[in-house]
Image (cartoon, rainbow, N blue to C red):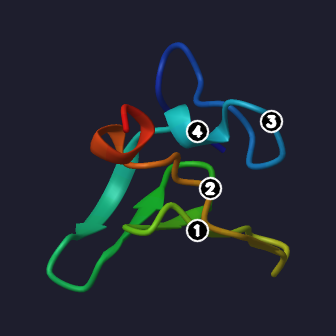
Amino acid sequence: MCPHQPACPAADATDAEAARIIAGHPEQGWNLLCNGVIQFEDTGELLPDGRCVAPHRGPALHLAAA
C-alpha cells in the first residue's frame, strides 16, 4: 500500500502519526496520511475503518510551568 521506503507505519500502529502526508489541507485543518489516517489540527484522528481518536494534545507549556 505505501510506496515509501521505509514503509509508513500502519494506521493501527502506535506510531501511525509518523506516516507521510499525501494530501495536506492546513487551511481546513486536516491532513491525509499515507496510511489512510485523517489527522486534524487539534490532534484528533479519523482512522480508515471509521473509528475516531480523540484529540490528545498535551497541556500548554506555559500552564504546565505555573
Residue under numbered circle 2: 56
Label 2–label 4 contact, CB within 8 A: no
* 3, 11: nearer the viewer: 11
* Circle 4 Cα neighbour tier, 10 Å, few/some/many (<14 / 14–19 / ≥20): some
Nearer the camera: disc 3 or disc 2? 2
28 lies above or below 2: below
What percent of the width, then of the height, locates residue 26?
A: 19, 71
36 lies above or below 28: above
Q: Secondary structure at mark 3?
A: loop
Q: Secondary structure at mark 2?
A: loop
Q: Disc 3 to disc 2, how far (Cα)?
A: 16 Å
Q: Disc 2 to disc 4, how far (Cα)?
A: 26 Å
Residue 31 lies left or right of residue 52; in this view the side is: left
Q: Disc 4 to disc 3, how far (Cα)?
A: 14 Å
Give, as a three-letter code, the residue at label 2: His
Q: Secondary structure at mark 1?
A: loop
Residue under numbered circle 4: 2
